[in-house]
Amino acid sequence: MQQKHFEHFYEQYSDAIFKYIFMLVGNKETAEDFTQETFYRAYKQFETFKEQASIQTWLRKIARNLVYDHYRRKRIIQFIPFLSQHEQQDTNLLPSEIVEKGEAIVAVYRALSKLKLEYKEVIILRKIEGLSIKETGNLLGWTEVKVKNATARAMQALKKELEEGGELHGEGFRSIIK
Amino acid sequence: MAKDLDQLLNELSTIERDPKQKQQSFQKLSKRIQHPTHKQFNKWKPAFALVMLVFVCSMYFLTLRSEPSTQNSVRAESMMELLKSDAIHFGSMDISTSHSLKYTPTGNPFRYFGFEKGVEPFSRIYNTEYFLKTAKPINNIDLKIHEISIRDVRVEYNNWNSGSEEILFLKFAFLDNTDKLLYVKDMNHNQWYKIEGEPAEKLQKLKYTSNYLDSCASIIYFYAGIYVLSFLIGAIIKDKFPIIKRTPIYIDKKHKYIDWSIRFGFILIIAGSLYYFGVIPIAMVVVLSFIYWGIQLYMELKHRPEAKRHYLIINLMIQATVILIGAIWYGLFR
C-alpha cells in the first residue's frame, strides 16, 4: 500500500477503530496506542486481507486480537501484587469524555465495564457501533442466532448490573431499564 | 425525561477522539512504517531455528547411539559354539514380529521399533537351549515370505567365563504349513540352521509367546496420562486464546499443499522403510516428526504469530518429547 493511500485509509477508518477499542479498554491512551498498532499491523499484512469481509471488519478483528491480548496480560498482572494495584487505579479512573456526558451515561458506562468481555463486546458492536447481526457474527465468528441470543442476554446482564450494582439512583434511572 | 437504555448506549458512540492525539498517533505510525524497527522476536528467529536443528540432531544421535553394555559385548562365537559351552546362563528374552529375513537389530538395535519387551520364554518353554542344540547348519535356503511367520529374538545371557552379560540375536522362520520344521538364523554369523521334529514342535510356542500387553501396562498408563495432560493443556490454551478456534488450520492454499506434501512424503518414507527393511526406524520417525512440526511452527510464527496456533504445536512437541523420553526410559528401543 502506498503512503498516500494509507493516509486516506487511516483517515477513513481510524476513528471507528479508536472508538471500538476505547469502549473495550476504557482508556484513551491505551486505545490510541492500540489504534496505532492496529493500523501498523494492517499495513504490514495488507496482502492477507481477503475481500470476503469488509475492510472495517478486518480492522476490527485485528483490534480485537490486540484487546484480547491486553486483557490476558491484565489477568496475569492480577497475580503480581505491586502491578495489580497500579492496574486497579487505572481502571477506576473514568475517561473525561464519559463524565462530560452526564450521570446517566456514567452509570451505563460503569455497568457496561463490569460485564464480562463477551457481553461487553456484543453490546458495543450491536448497540453502540450499530453493526448488523450479520456483521457482528462475521467479526466474532458467531452464527446469527448466537449473536441474537448473546445480545439479549448481554442487555439483561447490563440491566441487572444497573439495578444491583448500585448504578441506579432515583426514579429517572429506574425507567431506563423498563 | 428518562432516556431509553438503547439511546444511552447510542450516546456512548458519540465520544469524540482528540484530533491532536489522532494527528500525533498518525505521525508516529508513519515513522514506524518508514523506518520499521525489527522486534526482538525477529532477532531470535534464526537462533530458534538453530536450537531446533540442534535439538533434532541430538534426538537423532540419542536414538542412534549404541548401547554400551550390549552392543560392545555381542559375542564372537557362533550359536552352536555358544550352546555347546556350559559357561552360559540364558536370561530374559525379547521377541518381536518381523517382516524381514535380512534386517535385524543386530547392527543397531536402536533403529528398531516394536520389540516386545520382557518375554520370559523359559517359564513356558523349558530347555530352550536343548531344543536349539538340535539345530543343524544349512547353506542354502529358499523361503517364501508369504508362507512363513518371522520372529526376531534377542536373548540376553550371562557368560560365566567372561563374567559379562551378552546378547544373542536370532531370527526364527516358522513355516505356516508344518510345525515339524523351522529355521533359525544366527544373525551375527549370518548362518541358517534347521530344526526338525519334536524340538521344532516345542519351539512353535515361541510364535505365540507374548506378554507384550502385560509388560507394557505401565507404559500404556504413562502414555495415556501424558496424552490426557497434553489434551487438557491444549484445551486450556484454546480457552485462553479463543482466537485459535477462529483461525483456519492453513494460512493459505499453498501452505495446505506444502503441509499435505510433507505428510505424504512422511507416509511414503515410513511405508517404504517397512516394505524394504521390514521395520520402522524410530530415529527417522522422530526426526521427521520434529521436522514437520518445526516447519509448522516456522510458518505460524512467520505468518500469523498473533493467531497463537504455535502454542498448540509447541504443546504437541513437548508431548512427543516426553513420550520419546518415556520410551527410552522404558527401554522400548533396545
Image (cartoon, helix red, strand yellow):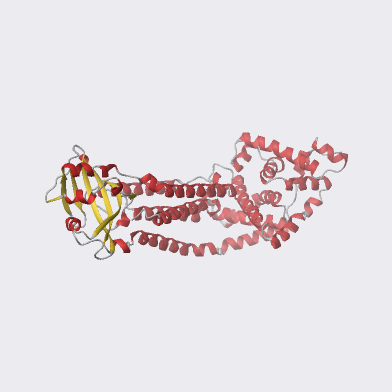
Would residue B46 be seen by someone viewing this image from the given angle? yes
Left or right: B202, with B36 as reference point: left
Left or right: A32, with B244 as reference point: right
Left or right: A158, with B251 as reference point: right
Residue occupying image coordinates x 41% and y 57%: B329
Would residue B38 be seen by someone viewing this image from the given angle? no
**Could you say where residue A25 lies in the image, as x and y percent from the top left?**
69, 52
Left or right: B98, with B194 as reference point: right
**Could you say where residue B51 lies in the image, as x and y percent from the top left?**
44, 63
Split into 4 quadrants, where in the image is the N terminus of chain B?
Answer: top right
Closer to the camera in the image, A177 or B215 = B215
Rendered position, A77 above or below B177: below
**Could you say where residue B24 lies in the image, as x and y percent from the top left?**
68, 61
Count how many numbered circles sit on residues in the image.
0
Split into 4 quadrants, where in the image is the C terminus of chain B?
Answer: bottom left
Q: Residue furthest left?
A: B139
**Could you say where residue B257 lies in the image, as x and y percent from the top left?**
40, 46
Rendered position, B130 above or below B40: above
Residue occupying image coordinates x 19% and y 56%: B83
Closer to the camera in the image, A47 or B114 = B114
Rendered position, A151 above or below B151: above
Residue occupying image coordinates x 70% and y 42%: A123
Closer to the camera in the image, B49 or A34 = B49
Closer to the camera in the image, B86 or A154 = B86
Quadrant housing residue B321: bottom left
